[in-house]
Image (cartoon, rainbow, N blue to C red):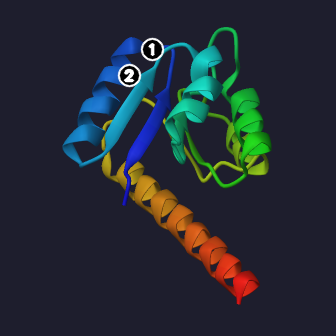
């Protein structure tokens, strides 16, 4: 299974720390500190799982989440934010995020668990689409 993740955050230190931990866990991480380049990166690299910060300059992470889901609802998005509010969680879920985790990240196990579930969900969707195509051909 391709374990490529796009991580978008305007904080280079967060990108570095999360990228290192996820790489150690076997993920290929593309870190991006310019949220306005996220959609092009997704289009160019066929990434199916993203981690987004919410409060970023130029593009808010919730707006980026909506753009991603409008482009392809099958891309799994996990919010990783320092904006700890009930509305953050509710808006993230309402717009289609798979999970909403909070910074600072001191334990990476919850993030790894959400990533694993996101990749498994993505794999199930691809299998269902393949099965549908096979049925249509038969």
Tell me residue 40's x, y (percent): 62, 24
Relative vertical location of residue 70 with respect to residue 42 in this rendering, above or below:
below
Q: Give whichever of 6, 130 is nearer the camera.
A: 130
Q: Give whichever of 92, 107 is nearer the camera.
A: 92
Quarter location, residue 24? top left
Q: Give whichever of 104, 3 is nearer the camera.
A: 3
Q: Which mark is residue 11?
A: 1
Quarter of the image where the N terminus is located: bottom left
Q: Which mark is residue 115?
A: none
Q: Residue furthest bottom?
A: 138
Tell me residue 65's x, y (percent): 70, 36
Quarter location, residue 107? top left
Relative vertical location of residue 115 with respect to residue 108 in this rendering, above or below:
below
- Pointer 2 residue: 14
What secondary structure is found at the residue carrying circle 2? helix
Give left or right: position of 111 versus 127. Answer: left
Tell me residue 123's x, y (percent): 51, 67
Residue at the location (51% across, 58% down)? 118
Distance of label 1 from label 2 (alpha carbons): 5 Å
Q: Residue furthest top?
A: 57
Residue at the location (50% across, 35% down)? 45
Q: Are marks 1 and 2 in contact (CB under 8 Å)?
A: yes
Residue at the location (39% across, 13% down)? 12
Relative vertical location of residue 51 with respect to residue 57 in this rendering, above or below:
below
Residue at the location (55% across, 27% down)? 41
Give left or right: position of 136 versus 117. Answer: right
Q: Give whichever of 129, 34 is nearer the camera.
A: 129
Tell me residue 73's x, y (percent): 73, 52
Q: Residue furthest front?
A: 137
């Amino acid at each position: 299974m391709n374990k490529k993740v796009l991580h978008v955050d305007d904080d280079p230190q967060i990108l570095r720390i999360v990228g290192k931990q996820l790489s150690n866990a076997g993920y290929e991480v593309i870190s991006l500190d310019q949220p306005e380049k996220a959609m092009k990166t997704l289009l160019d690299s066929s990434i199916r799982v993203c981690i987004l910060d919410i409060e970023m300059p130029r593009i808010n992470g919730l707006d980026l989440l909506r753009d991603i889901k409008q482009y392809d609802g099958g891309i799994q998005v996990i919010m990783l934010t320092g904006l700890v509010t009930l509305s953050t969680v509710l808006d993230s879920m309402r717009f289609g995020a798979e999970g909403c985790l909070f910074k600072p990240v001191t334990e990476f196990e919850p993030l790894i668990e959400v990533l694993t579930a996101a990749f498994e969900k993505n794999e199930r969707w691809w299998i269902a689409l393949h099965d549908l195509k096979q049925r249509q051909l038969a």
